[in-house]
Structure formats: structure tokens, C-alpha cells
Amino acid sequence: MIAFFAMWVVEIAVFVAVAVDPRLSPFSLYDSCRLLALIWWLHLFLLIGAI
């Protein structure tokens, strides 16, 4: 569970860094947002499955 939240914190930090400076990502900001949203949905399903 701690690893789950740690991954979430890292992903949010990466998202904020890319939002501030899009050159940090090989993807466009739009693609980064879509990828992050997909990862968040996967985490949500994993969290529901863990409960």
C-alpha cells in the first residue's frame, strides 16, 4: 500500500515537472496527460482490487 502511494506521488511530481517544462518529456503535454490518466485508472482498479 505504501508503494502504491509512493508511485502516485512520483507520477504527480513527473506530471507537474512536464507541465512546467514540456521539454522534459519525450511526449507532448497532451500525450503525457493521457498516459498519466491511464496509469491513474490502473492504480484505481488495483486499489479497488486490493480492498
Image (cartoon, helix red, strand yellow):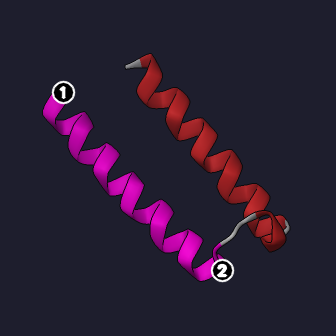
Callout 1 secondary element: helix
The residue carrying pointer 2 sits among few (fewer than 14), some (14 to 19) or many (20 or more) residues within 10 Å by Cα, namely some
Q: Residue at x 82, y 71 (%)?
A: 23
Residue at the disc numbered 2: 28
Q: Is residue 45 magenta?
A: yes
Screen quadrant of the C terminus: top left
Q: Residue at x 42, y 29 (%)?
A: 4
Q: Residue at x 54, y 28 (%)?
A: 6
State the extent of the magenta-drawn residues as a range: 27-51
Q: Position of residue 3 (x, y in %)?
A: 45, 22
Three-letter amino acid code at disc 1? Ala
Judged left or right of residue 44, residue 28 is right
Q: Is residue 13 magenta?
A: no
Instruction: Give residue 37's quadrant in the image.
Output: bottom left
Q: Is residue 44 above or below residue 47?
A: below
Callout 2 secondary element: loop
Three-letter amino acid code at disc 2? Ser
- Pick whichever of labels 2 and 1 is earlier in the sequence: 2
Check residue 50 in the rendering and tell me which mark sits there, or answer none.
1
Screen quadrant of the N terminus: top left
Name the magenta segment's main secondary structure.
helix
Q: CA distance from mark 2 to mark 1?
A: 33 Å
The residue carrying pointer 1 sits among few (fewer than 14), some (14 to 19) or many (20 or more) residues within 10 Å by Cα, namely few
Judged left or right of residue 12, residue 36 is left
Q: Position of residue 46 (x, y in %)?
A: 24, 38
